[in-house]
Image (spheres, rainbow, N blue to C red):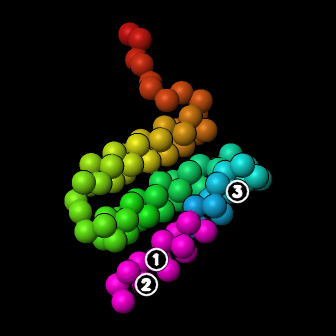
């Protein structure tokens, strides 16, 4: 029963990943693409989590942590770049 539900959830997550990729390519604005990138990272974390449940292993925990960190840093960096054009501000006194 658990494998059937996990398979259905993984199919739904795969569709969500495909829709996120479509929005990243076709997005009307850059901000929509940034949100799609963030959603793609979150959806990938869920997909890998479901894969861990199906395989009954904990070897992908590091993958989930790296995906979470990269997704967060990427979203913040792109948002900051779109806001002002500079990612790292340097004060030159």
Q: Residue at x 47, y 54 (%)?
A: 41
Q: Which mark is residue 22?
A: 3
Tell me if 18 is positioned left or right of 69 in this view: right
Q: Nearer the viewer, mark 3 or mark 1?
A: 1
Q: Residue at x 42, y 19 (%)?
A: 90
User: CB of mark 2 within 8 Å of CB of mark 1?
Assistant: yes
Measuring from the top left, give residue 56's x and y in whole percent: 25, 68
Spatial CA span between label 2 and label 1: 5 Å
Spatial CA span between label 2 and label 3: 27 Å
Measuring from the top left, give residue 58's x and y in whole percent: 22, 59
Q: Earlier in the sequence, mark 3 or mark 1?
A: 1
Quarter that holds the C terminus: top left
Tell me if 16 is positioned left or right of 71 in this view: right
Q: Outermost residue, left direction?
A: 58
Residue 47 within the magenta-colored segment of the rendering: no
Name the image quarter holding residue 54.
bottom left
Above-or-below relation of 41 to 85: below
How many marks the image carries: the answer is: 3
**Residue 32, can we see it?**
no
- The front one of 72 and 60 is 60
Q: Which mark is residue 59?
A: none
Q: Nearer the viewer, mark 2 or mark 3?
A: 2
Tell me if 55 is positioned left or right of 30 in this view: left
Magenta part of the chain: 1-15
Measuring from the top left, give residue 69's x and y in whole percent: 35, 46
Mark 1 lies on residue: 7
Q: Residue at x 58, y 39 (%)?
A: 83
Name the image quarter holding residue 46.
bottom left
């Amino acid at each position: 029963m658990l494998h059937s539900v996990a398979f259905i959830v993984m199919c739904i997550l795969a569709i969500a990943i495909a829709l996120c990729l479509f929005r990243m390519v076709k997005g009307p604005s850059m901000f929509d693409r940034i949100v799609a990138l963030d959603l793609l990272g979150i959806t990938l974390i869920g997909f890998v989590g479901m894969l861990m449940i199906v395989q009954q292993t904990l070897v992908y925990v590091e993958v989930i942590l790296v995906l979470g960190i990269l997704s967060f840093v990427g979203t913040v960096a792109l948002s900051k770049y779109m806001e002002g054009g500079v990612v790292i501000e340097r004060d030159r006194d």
